[in-house]
Amino acid sequence: MVLALAASRNLWAVDWPWKKKPPDEVTARCVIEPAEVEQGFPGRLRPKVEAADSRSHPLAYVWSSNGGVLTGTGPAVEMDASQLNPGVYSVSAAVQDAYSHRASCVADFRVAPRPDSLTMACSSGPEVVEPGARVEVRAEATDLLGHPLRYRWFANAGTIEGEGSAVQLDTSGLRSGLYTITGRVEDGLGGASDCVITVKVEIPPPILPPPPPPEPLNIAEIVFARNRQALEPAGQSQLQHVLERLRTERSGRVSLESYADPAEQEPQKLAAARAETVKRYLLENGVPESQIATVVGLGGRRGGLRNRTLDIIWLPDGVHY
């Protein structure tokens, strides 16, 4: 048997013409968080690149920036921007595979100026003065950005003398009352801060002479019968009042001044016995001996019943008799 092959002028392969594979492509997209910080921001910014290789080749990353300090490697790093001045900066990432296919991207971030903060506190001394005295007034002000400061002072009465952060209020001619001092500090750029303090002007009261010193006071007169040293009811009644005063005014003392008529028997001894009778009565009723003094004499010049009288003299504290 003879086999004959049919010849064909055109031979076609499967999938002809062959399709070319797409070229290798690397893409990159950069982001940074946060994208805006305040000057002096103490934290870290986080730059990141979202990269892809169409053939899934491993990628290498190179970072750069026109400001700040970058740390780390790979698709995500960190940046210290604490020393940057206000402005707009950028961070760049270059991404490449082993076949020199590469892509790059840029992310911008902004450093905003710190808001100004101006504060002022005032103090004065003394807080209470007499008319004509001077009051020292002092201010303590701070400006976060360090601007030169200017101080201004106002008072609703009196005269402000001096300038700057420390002045004086002259209170000459002011009446007694409360007066207000207002301080203001300005940075020349529209920033300002105020403080208010109050000063009291007071006319001192007149100086009065000291009160007269206390004087001895006769608080009892006990009359004895002729030639007798015993207490009679009237005398005992008076001694009860003396006891009451000694109990309520323990800082005082009493002086027993006892007399006898020269015509009585042994008048000197009789006067002493009468003083002893009264003293013993007081002691027996709880009066300390330190609160009792005795004086004995003759009553020849006193006349009548006074020659036979024992006087009890009250001696206030501090009085020596």
Image (spheres, rainbow, N blue to C red):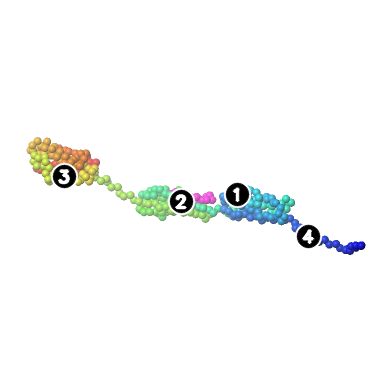
Camera-nearest residue between 186 and 121: 121
The CA distance from mark 2 to mark 1 is: 35 Å
- Residue under label 2, please give it: 121
Are the residues at dot 2 and dot 1 in contact (C-beta closer than 8 Å)? no
Left or right, residue 118 beside residue 65: left
**Which residue is pictured at 45% across the width and 53% down the height?**
195
Decide which of tag 3 and tag 4 comes sooner along the chain: 4
Residue 144, magenta (yes or no): yes
Q: Quadrant of residue 112?
A: bottom right
Q: In x, y percent, where is residue 305?
A: 10, 43
Q: In x, y percent, where is residue 44?
A: 59, 50
Are the residues at dot 1 and dot 3 in contact (C-beta closer than 8 Å)? no
Three-letter amino acid code at the position of disc 3? Leu
- Residue under label 1, please give it: 80
Decide which of tag 2 and tag 4 comes sooner along the chain: 4
Decide which of tag 3 and tag 2 comes sooner along the chain: 2
The boundaries of the magenta stretch are 137-150
